[in-house]
Image (cartoon, rainbow, N blue to C red):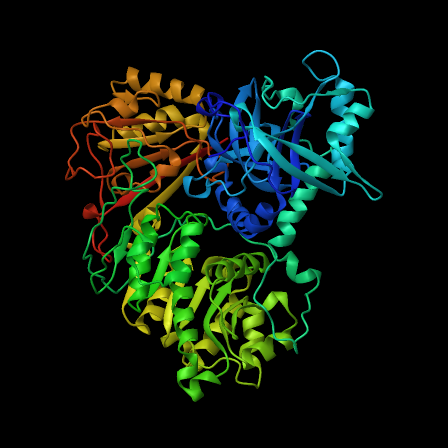
């Protein structure tokens, strides 16, 4: 991954002269002095724009409070909230160094160094870390400082000002120096003339001609002082604004629209729809239908290789038919167009939900996927949906009746205008290399409804829409949706739609069912398991698969009872000892902070209980137990089956408890110990889906005690 600094191996290379290349239009993104700056070719920016935009749209899903870190190390990939853009935007970066509480970060897609605080950083997932823009190190050839070996401040500032105000920069490489720095004839063009950078410095009395191509030019290490400051009160520099706008402009490519249809944009109100966060379920949900567990899969290729005793790398899959997971999208018959697009996205390691969902959808099965947002849910169906649409578009002319049938091949129903734009962009990118006269993707929020109706009458591939727009389409007297032609019906995200407008969601379901669309291949993405509603939908489908990535929801699906009691904080110590005296064998306690943890630990130790604190839990034997952090606790089926919970001071029960806790265990573990392939060497045990009891059986009762002042 390029981070803006030369490598040691590059520094050892001897300088060598190159045949003068052709002049190329460039952008300088980071200027240190006339002999050292970062640049990128304009053609490379244009070619990478769509990919950059595609990745940046996905970054917000990974910027959650649960994923924040207090410390980042050198060369670690990060997501950066760039405050100097309005509104602030998320970009990708690589940490170069740390100084106190500040970080120097190389911004991957825009080619400059940024000084920012830890509150504006999140870890960058590995599958989004691919370097896209080819930034290079450059310098002006045939010139040297007027005196000495170092450039004066006035020389640096005067040339920097000319380069930043220029309308165009051209670069003709003459030779490559140490650290692979390209030295070239640099010209800048203003509104009235074109000038050579070397000649400009000589005229200003700040440089002298040097015909040598092999002179020793030092590399100045980038410092915090020369980095951009991540402060929203400071405007973005013109050179950075130029590349940001260029990437954004070239990323706005979309599916061509017939000439007769005039494109129009919808105004403000639709852009103000809000996305709602869904709380974790705390009530018992049951199902009358028992779905047999037929297969357990443990992936050996997960991104996180750290020791783990939870199920965050596994899924629970229920289906009446065997589901055989894949290890890569390349095992699936998706077609060259989709496979090449996935390669361009550097889709190296699929998530557990994806390796189950993809083959099931390829085999024409329906899917209910229950998992929180930001877990790759949309990519669990997008490649297969787009592949199927392209296959149908290829064969569309084989039958005249099929060719003139109106309506979409797939309806993708999303919860907001923002997500409609995002998922439409994903579909366009996946299908971008497929040539057809038909519309591949129609986002109803990118056009007027009149134009959308015309597009649907001419047929299209994927219709991306929201509840209100789909209701309008289904209410129209024209046959805008042909149930015979329709192949897929996708609801993403069900819970947000239900919270936003439950009545409208119900109305849309009724209209869709009345024209026979629910019998099509159904994909339903949700954050919670809604037993009654989902079972009715699944009864109308063929080959359904219920896929859980969230094991708290899976436990509720299986019959978990969750009892919550609220008590005063003053009663903690006494109530805690009373509860432990009641015969509970294994108890997991969450505290408000480290101080309270130590206080409770002292009380419990004095009473004869054995405790494990946060720093020692991971190395304990099975007879002592392990500590689970809150994010992984909810995914740990072992804890859901065997642990009695005590949760203290959770700020009136809003949100998850903090990550402080201690575990009390008495006696040896009684569950079936199974080694998981994803566990690192030395783990004593791990819980697996083999412990899961069939739905409809009440196998666990979880007691939670909440205290507040």
As drawn, 301 above or below 225 = below
Q: Residue at x 58, y 77 (%)?
A: 455
Q: Residue at x 67, y 13 (%)?
A: 149
Outermost residue on the bottom side: it is: 401
Which of 237 and 340 lies nearest the eye of the viewer? 340
Query: Is residue 559 visible to us here?
Result: no
Which of 186 and 308 lies nearest the eye of the viewer? 186
Outermost residue on the right side: it is: 192
Which of 363 and 554 lies nearest the eye of the viewer? 363
What x and y, as percent, mark residue 262? Answer: 68, 73
What x and y, as percent, mark residue 151? Answer: 71, 17
What x and y, as percent, mark residue 685? Answer: 20, 33
As drawn, 446 above or below 574 = below
Which of 547 and 561 lies nearest the eye of the viewer? 547
Outermost residue on the top side: it is: 148
Query: Is residue 486 visible to us here?
Result: yes
Q: Is residue 290 left or right of residue 456?
A: left
Q: Residue at x 76, y 22 (%)?
A: 155
Q: Quadrant of residue 358?
A: bottom left
């Amino acid at each position: 991954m390029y981070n803006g600094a030369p490598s040691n191996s590059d520094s050892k290379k001897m300088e060598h002269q190159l045949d003068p290349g052709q002049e190329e239009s460039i952008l300088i993104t980071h200027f240190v002095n006339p002999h050292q700056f970062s640049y990128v070719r304009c053609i490379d920016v244009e070619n990478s724009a769509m990919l950059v935009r595609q990745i940046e749209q996905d970054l917000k899903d990974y910027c959650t409070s649960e994923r924040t870190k207090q410390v980042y190390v050198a060369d670690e990939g990060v997501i950066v909230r760039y405050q100097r853009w309005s509104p602030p935007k998320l970009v990708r970066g690589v940490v170069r160094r740390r100084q106190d509480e500040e970080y120097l970060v190389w911004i991957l897609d825009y080619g400059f160094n940024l000084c920012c605080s830890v509150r504006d950083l999140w870890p960058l997932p590995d599958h989004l870390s691919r370097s896209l823009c080819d930034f290079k190190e450059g310098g002006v050839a045939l010139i040297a400082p007027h005196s000495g070996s170092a450039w004066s401040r006035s020389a640096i500032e005067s040339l920097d000002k000319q380069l930043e105000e220029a309308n165009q920069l051209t670069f003709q490489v003459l030779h490559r120096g140490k650290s692979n720095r390209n030295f070239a004839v640099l010209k800048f063009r203003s509104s009235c003339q074109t000038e050579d950078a070397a000649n400009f410095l000589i005229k200003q009395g700040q440089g002298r001609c040097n015909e040598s191509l092999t002179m020793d030019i030092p590399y100045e290490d980038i410092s915090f002082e020369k980095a951009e400051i991540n402060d929203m009160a400071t405007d973005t520099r013109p050179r950075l604004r130029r590349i940001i706008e260029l990437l954004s402009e070239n990323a706005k490519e979309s599916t061509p629209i017939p000439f007769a249809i005039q494109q129009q944009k919808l105004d403000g109100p639709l852009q103000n729809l809000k996305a709602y966060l869904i709380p974790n379920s705390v009530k018992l949900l049951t199902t009358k239908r028992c779905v047999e567990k037929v297969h357990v899969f443990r992936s050996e290729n997960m991104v996180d290789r750290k020791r783990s005793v939870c199920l965050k790398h596994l899924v629970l899959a229920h289906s009446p038919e065997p589901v055989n997971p894949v290890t890569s999208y390349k095992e699936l018959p998706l077609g060259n167009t989709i496979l090449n697009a996935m390669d361009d996205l550097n889709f190296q390691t699929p998530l557990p939900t994806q390796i189950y969902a993809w083959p099931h959808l390829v085999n024409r099965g329906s899917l209910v996927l229950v998992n929180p947002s930001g877990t790759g849910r949309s990519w669990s169906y997008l490649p297969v949906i787009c592949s199927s649409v392209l296959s149908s578009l290829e064969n569309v002319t084989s039958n005249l009746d099929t060719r003139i049938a109106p309506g979409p091949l797939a309806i993708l129903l999303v919860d907001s205008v923002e997500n409609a734009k995002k998922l439409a962009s994903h579909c366009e990118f996946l299908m971008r290399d497929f040539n057809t006269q038909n519309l591949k993707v129609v986002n109803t929020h990118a056009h007027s409804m009149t134009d959308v109706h015309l597009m649907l009458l001419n047929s299209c591939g994927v219709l991306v829409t929201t509840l209100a727009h789909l209701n309008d389409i289904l209410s129209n007297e024209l046959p805008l949706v042909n149930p015979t032609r329709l192949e897929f019906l996708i609801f993403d995200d069900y819970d947000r739609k239900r919270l936003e407008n439950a009545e409208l969601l119900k109305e849309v379901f009724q209209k869709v069912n009345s024209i026979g669309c629910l019998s099509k291949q159904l994909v339903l993405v949700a954050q919670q398991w809604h037993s009654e509603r989902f079972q009715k939908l699944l009864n109308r489908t063929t080959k359904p698969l219920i896929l859980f990535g969230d094991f708290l929801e899976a436990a509720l699906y299986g019959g978990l009872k969750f009892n919550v009691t609220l008590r005063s904080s003053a009663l903690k110590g006494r109530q805690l000892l009373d509860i432990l005296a009641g015969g509970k064998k294994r108890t997991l306690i969450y505290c408000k902070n480290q101080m309270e943890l130590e206080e409770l630990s002292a009380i419990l130790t004095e009473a004869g209980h054995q405790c494990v604190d946060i720093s020692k839990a991971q190395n304990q034997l099975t007879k002592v137990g392990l500590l689970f952090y809150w994010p992984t606790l909810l995914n740990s089926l072992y804890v859901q089956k065997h642990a009695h919970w005590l949760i203290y001071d959770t700020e009136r029960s809003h949100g998850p408890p903090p990550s402080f806790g201690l575990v009390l265990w008495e006696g040896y573990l009684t569950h079936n110990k199974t080694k998981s392939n994803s566990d690192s060497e030395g783990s004593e045990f791990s819980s697996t889906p083999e412990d899961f009891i069939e739905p409809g059986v009440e196998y666990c009762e979880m007691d939670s005690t909440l205290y507040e002042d």
